Structure formats: C-alpha cells, structure tokens
Image (cartoon, rainbow, N blue to C red):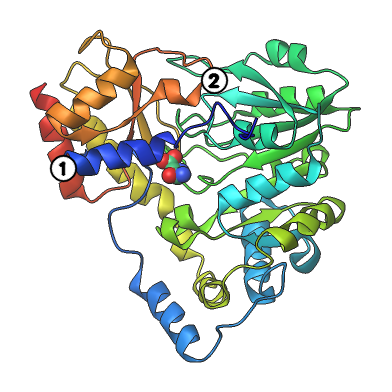
Amino acid sequence: PLSKLSNVGTTIFSQMTQLANENQAINLSQGFPDFMPDSELLNYVDDFIKKGFNQYAPLGGMIGLKEEIARKIENSHQAIYHPDAEITVTAGGTQAIFTAIAAFIKRDDEVIIFEPAYDCYEPTVELFGGIVKRFEMKAPHYEIDWNAVKGLISEKTKMIILNNPNNPSGKILTENDIRELIKIVKDTSILILSDEVYENIVFDGKQHLSICRYPELKERSLLVASFGKLFHVTGWKIGYCAAPKALTDEFRKVHQFNVFCVNTPIQLALAEYMKNDDHYNQLSSFFQKKRDFLRQGLASTSFELLDCEGTYFQALKYDKVSDKNDFDFASELTVTHKVASVPFSSFYKNKVNENVIRLCFAKKEETLEKAIENLTKI
Ligand code: GLN
C-alpha cells in the first residue's frame, strides 16, 4: 500500500478551525491565543533580524538560549541540565516529540500512552513501526489506574509518553502518580517522553511536577517544552528537548537531518527576553483569570464544568444539553451557535464518547464574553 498512515486524516484542530472560519464562529477549538505577544519580545526579534543574525544556528541551538533554558529548569525544578550537551532547541514541541520517537522507536517496540491523548503521539510511533498500548483515562476525573498501566508493560515496552499537564483534560500528575511511575520503571530500561508544553500554566496554587525533579526518572527522560505556549507565539514553532547527554546525542542524530537547526533571530530574541523571569512566572495567574472568567460565565448553564488544573483548555460535559455524540454536538455548536470546540472522542483511538468537548480559553476577554453569551442561550 502507498500510505504509511492509512487511518490518519487531517488533524481535528485543522478541521475545527476550518469549520469555525466557514461559519464565522468564535474559534475556541484549536489552542492558540487571539491576542498579541509582548511587544518587548517582538522588538528583540526585529532587532536581531536587522542586525544581521539571519543565517544558520548551531544544530543544538544558540548557546545563550540554551543557557537561559537550563537556568529556567534549575530555578523551577532544581534539576541540572548541561546547556550545550543536554538541551536541543527544536521547531516546536511537535518536532521534538517526532524526533524523540524517531530516534528511539524501532519496529515492534511498544509505547504506552495515556488517553485522552494529544493527536501526534500515536501516528508518529506507528510511522516507525512501533506498537501503541493505551490506558484510557475517563471523565470526569481522568485518573490513572497504575495497576492497569503495569499490566500494559512487557519486555517490549520501550517508552512511556506522558503529557503533564494533560491536553485536553487539564489534569496534572500528583505526587502519588509519580511514585507509582517510579515503581513501574525501576529496574527496566523504559524511556520516558514527557510532553510538558503547558508546564507554566497550572492553577489554584498547585505545583507542576516535572519529570526532571526525580533523578530516577530524569536519567531516562526526554523532556519537551514549548515557547509557543510560554510566550503566546504558537506560530513561531519553537520549543526544546532536555535530556541526559546519551539520549540527547541520539536525539540530535535525527534532529540534524530533520530540521538541522531552528531559526536564529527568534532564538536570540527569546534568550534576551528570558533573562527576566517575570516574563513567565506570571503565566499561571494570567491564564487562571481567563479560566475563572469562562467558568463563572458558564456556571449558570446546564454545561458541567470538569476540573481544570492546568493547560488553557476547559472540558465541558454537555449531557444535560444534548444527547448527540460529541462530534455531532461540536459541529452543531459551531454551525448553529457559532462557538467552535474540539470533541473529546478525537483524543481516543476508540473514539470514546463521554459527551465532553474542549474549549480553549487563551483568548481576549471580549472573545470569551461572546462565546459565553452564545453558550448561555442554548
Ligand atoms: N496544540 C494545539 C491544540 O491542542 C493544536 C496544535 C495543532 O493545531 N496541531 O489545540
């Protein structure tokens, strides 16, 4: 057969954004801010371009940026990564995830993922001949049954992919989750790919427990993060992967032939901007205001607001509003009520429908206000 991914179509995010645009609906589907990034950051980019920094960067990234990343990780998690040997700047979180999977997954290797799962993990594993084993987290609490996860482990298990905070459920891992994970991987050579792109968006004073805080996990982990989420620049497609040298060496073998390097002036601008920690320390409270605004606005409706501990996504259970499946309901909501969302079933291989949709609240207050108005009328 010609296709290597015969079961894969266009991503749900592109589909829903297109439907939103066709119907002039308020787009709370694909996760991206509808407001401007900080002009200080934009000015740095402009400066570096005009000063002539427009040629290739070193393949691992500009040293100044890698140093700032290492400093951020150390300050946030008391974990040390060598900037030059253990941090690689990537063209966004998705490229880092793709490269990590490409570098380590061979035919018949098994990879454990947790659903609802961000859409790129499974197809990428399949592309390299790996086999996905999945644990389904279910509404309303999306908890992990670690005994069940243990049951998925075999001698073929090569990697566990975590997404913490979780897109789309907004769940974060607890100390207990981490303890169970440590037990499971102890005495194995299982790698962990930890997608933590929403690490700085965690609410109600809770703490994001990065994989790198735990030496027994850090030594086997590839940690992925994203500047798109950190500084409201999803279209810049820039992020990074932090991992021990032996893992980074393998990661870079693939990275150099995938993108080789990432654009130079933006790396320089980010390095400059990151010197001030306030530029990311306020992110949780910035988004918590938006989350609370959306939740308060919907509190009097028949939608059930599920917990949102992190990320900029709010999950809504709508079984008191409609008995349609989530895909049909999300379409109706876009076409008739002019609010676009993402149906949760698209985050499950088996299309688990629990009548839940995802709304992105990384939006201006006026955008959220209009969406609330429409959703209140239903
Ligand atoms: N991460 C974004 C989301 O979850 C989507 C990115 C994309 O469109 N691929 O909505």
* Furthest-right residue in this view: 187
Contact? badges 2 and 1 (CB < 8 Å): no
Q: Give neighbour class at mark 1: few <14, some 14-19, many 20+ (Cα, 10 Å).
A: some
Q: Is residue 131 visible?
A: yes
Question: Which percent across, then down, holds residue 238?
Answer: 54, 60
Q: Secondary structure at mark 2?
A: loop
* Furthest-left residue in this view: 377
* Furthest-bottom residue in this view: 51
Residue drawn where x is 89% and y is 28% of the image: 188
Q: Quadrant of the N terminus?
A: top right
Q: Nearer the viewer, residue 78 or 10?
A: 10
Q: Nearer the viewer, residue 317 or 176?
A: 317
Judged left or right of residue 113, residue 279 is left
* Furthest-front residue in this view: 1
Up the image or down, 294 lies above or below 185; here it is: below
Q: Secondary structure at mark 1?
A: loop
Question: Which percent across, then down, holds residue 224?
Answer: 63, 48
Residue bearing the label numbered 1: 24
Up the image or down, 172 lies above or below 262; here it is: above
Residue drawn where x is 18% and y is 46% of the image: 367
Q: Where on the picture, by quarter, is residue 136? A: top right
Judged left or right of residue 273, residue 286 is left
Circle 2: residue type: Lys
Up the image or down, 90 lies above or below 263; here it is: above
Residue bearing the label numbered 2: 349
Circle 1: residue type: Gln
